[in-house]
Image (cartoon, rainbow, N blue to C red):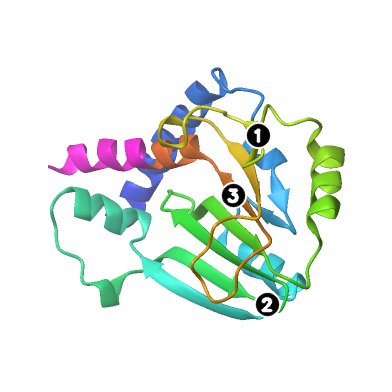
Amino acid sequence: MKARSALLGLIIWTAVVAADATQASAADSSAYQVSGFRLGATVEKIQAAATKSDLITQSVVRGPSFEQAIMQAQRKLIPGRDYAGVRMVRARGEAAEAQVTFAPTPEGPRAIKIVYDVLPGGPDIPTLEAKLLNDYGAPNQRSEREWVWGDTGAFYSRKNAYLEFRPNPVSAGVRRPIATLILADPALQERSRETIAVEAAKGS
């Protein structure tokens, strides 16, 4: 039953991706990365990127798998201790820390949001700005508070992938970052939700 559900989910997922591809903006999520952290990546690739960037202290927050997310959408109770997927990976190092959020898909958890804090001891702001301009060109939106590539709508209404750079962000944390980079793909998250909803409706 689980195999059949996963297969049907994968078929729906593929169809949704194909439909979205015709509406894709220039903001292709796979184009955005920071220190090897990429949107759409698997948990294993995110952990490998963290290790390579010397973010050695890592923790994993479990979450529902794709099949379990379908069951939850059908109002079935899944104890947290039984979660088979991943909701978040946190990684910390001396000069940076990252928090990566995942969405359940038929192919496994995929990264939909990456928050990467550059700490004192890491690259300074002029160096970061120069690298971003070299990698992505001039931002689509620029202010003293933030630079944005990709979808420049209000953050709560963005539908496509974006990269946001915030120099000197406000932070209440003990380790105050000198800069924060935020990569997110709302379209990938929405595809996950739509596919789960379709599969859940079949079994209701």
Whichever of callouts 3 and 2 sits on the residue coming sooner in the sequence is 2
Residue at image mark 1: 143
Whichever of callouts 2 and 1 sits on the residue coming sooner in the sequence is 2
Residue lying farthest top?
Answer: 22
Q: Nearer the viewer, mark 2 or mark 1?
A: 1
- Name the residue type under label 2: Gly
Residue lying farthest bottom?
Answer: 57
Q: Nearer the viewer, residue 54 or 105?
A: 54
Residue at image mark 3: 182
Label number found at residue 93: 2
Tell me if 155 is positioned left or right of 139 in this view: left
Q: Are marks 2 and 1 in contact (CB under 8 Å)?
A: no
Secondary structure of the residue carrying numbered label 3: strand
Secondary structure of the residue carrying numbered label 2: loop
- Name the residue type under label 3: Ile
Bounds of the magenta segment: 193-204
Q: Residue at x 19, y 37 (%)?
A: 201
Mark 2 crowdedness (10 Å alpha carbons): few <14, some 14-19, many ≥20: some
| Above or below, 148 relative to 182 | above
Q: Residue at x 21, y 55 (%)?
A: 72
Q: Residue at x 26, y 50 (%)?
A: 70
